[in-house]
Image (spheres, helix red, strand yellow):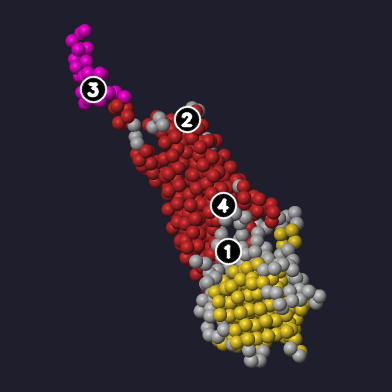
Amino acid sequence: MSARAEQESRAAGPAGRDGAGGTAAGRDRVRRPGFGRLVWAEWTKLRSVPAWLVGLAVAALLTAAIGLLICGASVCSRQDAHGREVACTATIGPDGRNVTDRFYFVHRPMTGDGSLTVRLTALDATLPWAKAGIMVKNGVRPGAGYAAVLVTPGHGARLQYDFEHDVAGPPGAVSPGRPRWLRLTRAGDGVTGSVSPDGHHWTTVGTARLAGLPRTAQVGVFAATPLDLGRTDSMTQSTVHPEPTVATATFDRVRATGGAAGASWTGTRIGDSGPLRTAAGGYHDTGGTLRVRGSGDIAPAVSSIASITPIERTLLGTFAGLVAIAVVASSSIGAEYRRGTIRLTLLASPRRGRVLAAKAVVVGGVVFVVGLATSLAAVALGTRLLRANGNVVAAVPAATEARVVVGTAALLAVAAVLALAVAAIVRHAVGAIVAVLAGLVLPYLLAAVLPVLPAPAAEWLLRVSPAAGFAVQQTMLAYPQVDTSYTPFDGYYPLAPWLGFAVLCGWTVVALTAAGLLLRRRDA
């Protein structure tokens, strides 16, 4: 062995170690950047490209500005009893949500415990959710708590209370040859509804607990029928033409016990105001037979027929912000393919899957922060504009509003990662932008913004496409006892908010997995 070779052998040490006590492979492992360094490197790239920062600013501006422009142009007014234009109003129920409380009520005071029994001999109404029966109500103020046992033409007997709650009873409609006996019994704050075919054999439908029911409440009979929506579906769109209807109910065999006995009847048209006209109501008392004529509904309010604006209206610019975000996200890797710098990136970190993951973390994280700030500002300013223009913003729990804000930010972030993954697959920014817009933005516009698709087609599109993620913005609830238009154009998505968001996440995971596999298997 030469003197030089012997010196190199001593420097390397035993088992091929260098003077620092490590192998050559060990030095490679030390020098290879960890995932944290990869994330920092991608963050440095993102913030060092002015065009990408401008793109994020444009995304925030479009998301907020379009929503604010729409809110600023939304004006709601109605005519009062004197023909004057006044701001729209809405009724708030016992739980703080918007409700519809418009019907004709023939009532008298009920002090303490007692019961009211009647026979319903006829219900002249065409809509399946028209209703007539007995009600105990906390006064005659619209939105006050109540419990009612009633009969409908299409859904049999029911116990409904405090607008949202609906308990099914025996099926069957009412006719002169098949009357229905109804009984409502109060014991403290509990109200029990019962029905009978003959006045002797009774079936208990259920018991409602009415928090805050005063000692003296109002009890009586009522009639109501909702708007006839007259929806027509064509090859290109769904159209709704709401028209008022009238229900006429006939009651006899009226028997009152306890605190419900003794007083005379008073007729009151409850909640006779709103954006849509209501047919007149009234009653006649002929020898103990009450004939009540009423219009309106007693139910939760839905945006398709009530003068309420959901808070997601303030975020209608989200789709435009997605366009700018898709450009930034796809360019973050597409530009490297176009310029050939992707080779340097992969040489610095041969584990290509970690490079893609680092890019996804940076792009998704930055977009989430930008989207969160933008959503907060858009909702706060948009709701203020809506109220200033006379609109009634739908009352929702704070948790629901938080879900809309955070969910919108998450929607933008996941869409950005989807655009990044598609760009890694096609290795071209423009192709990725077109693919994301076709799969995410276009289905949303066709199904939920522009009424160009019939409801079944729109719902199918928002079940299977990445645009299902927009469901995370929905705040309005659908109720079985409210027969109305629950279409995407009306703000009702076919999937629950987080389930729709999960569909978008599923598409993103598939695209990201495919991008990682292709990145490892093919040349840069």
Residue type pointed to by label 2: Arg
Relative image position of residue 203 (x, y in whole percent):
67, 72
How far is mark 1 from mark 4, CA to CA? 15 Å
- Look at the numbered disc 1 and give the secondary structure of its residue: loop
Distance between mark 1 and mark 2 Cα atoms: 45 Å
Figure check: 315 above or below 516: below
Q: Is residue 234 left or right of residue 12?
A: right
Disc 1 residue type? Met
Q: Which residue in the protein does label 1 denote? A: 476
Q: Please say if 95 is above or below 447.
A: below
Circles 1 and 2, Cβ within 8 Å, touching? The answer is no
Q: CA distance from mark 4 to mark 3?
A: 57 Å
Secondary structure, mark 4, is helix
Tag 4: residue type? Gly
Q: Between residue 334 and residue 232, name the one nearer to us.
A: 232
| Residue drawn at (55%, 43%) of the image | 507
Q: Which residues are magenta?
A: 1-25
Name the residue carrying label 4. 500
Disc 3 marks a residue whose amino acid type is Asp
Residue 104 colored in magenta in the image: no
Q: Is residue 30 left or right of residue 20?
A: right
Who comes first in sequence, dot 4 or dot 3? 3
Identified at 65% across, 86% down, the residue is 256
Secondary structure beneath dot 3 equals loop
Disc 2 element: helix
Q: CA distance from mark 1 to mark 3?
A: 69 Å
Q: Which residue is mark 2?
A: 520
* Foreground label between 4 and 3: 4
Q: Quadrant of the rendered structure where residue 219 is? A: bottom right
In terms of image quadrants, where is residue 272? bottom right
Image quadrant occupied by the N terminus: top left
